[in-house]
Image: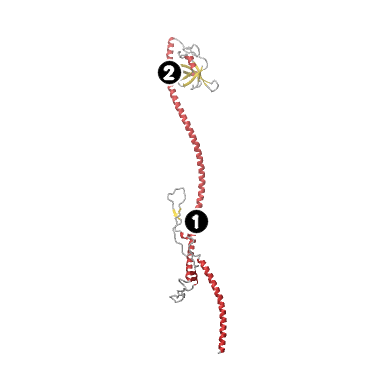
Amino acid sequence: MGKVLRGLVVVILILSAVSLFFANALFNKRELLTTRNDAFQDQFIKLARTLEAADASGGEVAPVRKDVSEVSERELANPEIVNVLDGYPIWLEQQNLPTLDFGSTEKRVQLRSVFALGPDGKPELDPVDQKRRTKGPGTMQELLELAFDRAKAQQATLNKTRYELAKKREEFTAAIDDNNKLKVNARVALVELKGEKIKVTDLETEKTALTGQVNKLNAEKRELTAELADAKSETERLNEEKVTLTEDLTKARDTIEEFKKQIAGRGVTPVHGGSSLLPLDTPPSAGDKGKIISANDELKFAVIALSDDAMDELLGAERQNALPQLEMNVRRTGRQSAAGEFVTRIKLRQAVRGKNLVVADILNDWQQTPVEKGDVVFF
């Protein structure tokens, strides 16, 4: 019996030593597992804070209308318009959404609970297989599944964002190409516009110059119109005087013919070569006597405006004498010499009563050139 007890004591001592050894080994493993579990738990909580707790809610985006009709010189009343943001998921732009937070004491306890615990603190049994429940509310698996689901949803959102970015990049590239084409056309248009502006400036300058010329011509036109009106009035007056002088000339010629008949009946021969039918007591003095105011080369007569001195010499101071039929000379000043150019000789025929006007015949034998208004009569 004593030997048996000694044997049992030895066995117990050996087992105690082995237990102590395994206890020490298990304690080290427990520390390792505990430390590793705490590290995994802390990192999982940090990772969970990067996962959005819920999906972003939808929203409406204001339409962005783009004119897609071609650019041409044709005016478009109703160009084709498209909404470039049609179907655009605006909810992708939402930022700072709430994330998962497993850092509370309750969540930390749940992360350590592999089995679901009942109110009494003991593990609950699964009603199906009667094993300890490891899934569902209150278990670590619940939080892991929640984090996994939110990670999958966030990955889907990320892929959706990438797809929309790729689509918008294509649209943006097309818009840039269109913009580059428009800029090329705009540069060409600006060059043409600059040329047209230069032309407009030149035309404005020409217009200003032409306006000045038009104003000047209008002023000259008004002056010429006034001069024309004066000339018409003077012409009418001269025509009236011409009619009067023509009548006086006709009467003078009739009188001369009557004198010729009387002289022929009396047997008197008129003397030519500068003498007159009615001789003067004293011949006129030499010098200018007047100017031609009208002449008719076809009828060979002219109207002379004599000076007062010449009229006194020919008709007397009281104009009481008859006009002597003298021959006088006609010259045109400012031509070949200072004295002027000889035109012809004239013969006085009839004086106009009350005026210093005399009608005279133009002598063909002496005529060098047609008599003109302004020619000087001298003796």
In the rendered image, which quarter is residue 256 located in?
top left
Residue 193 can be seen in this image: yes
The quarter holding residue 25 reads bottom right
Residue 378 vertical position relative to residue 123 in the rendered view, above or below: above
In the picture, the disc for residue 5 is none
**154 or 379: which is nearer to us?**
154
Estimate the x, y position of residue 232 in percent, counting from the top left.
44, 26
Badge number at residue 248: 2
Amino acid type, mark 2: Asp
Residue 359 appears at what percent x and percent y? 46, 18
Left or right of 28: which side holds 143?
Answer: left
Residue 193 placed where, x, y %?
50, 45
**Residue position for label 1:** 172
Question: Badge 1: how crowded within 10 Å, few (<14), some, or many (20+)?
Answer: few
- Other residues around mark 2 within 10 Å, as few (<14) / some (14–19) / many (≥20): some
Camera-side residue: 92 or 163? Answer: 92
Q: Give whichever of discs 2 and 1 has the lower sequence position.
A: 1
Judge depth for marks 2 and 1 and give the one in front. Answer: 1
Up-down: is 56 above or below 81? below
* In this view, 249 is above or below 4: above
Residue furthest to the top: 266
Which element is circle 1 on? helix
One can see residue 324 in this view: no
Residue located at (50% from left, 49% from top): 186
Q: What's the residue at 45%, 26% (across, down)?
A: 230
**Image point 46% across, 30% down: which residue?**
222
Question: What type is the residue that disc 1 sits on?
Answer: Phe
Mark 2 to mark 1: distance in Å?
A: 106 Å
* Image location (x, y in percent) of residue 259: 43, 13
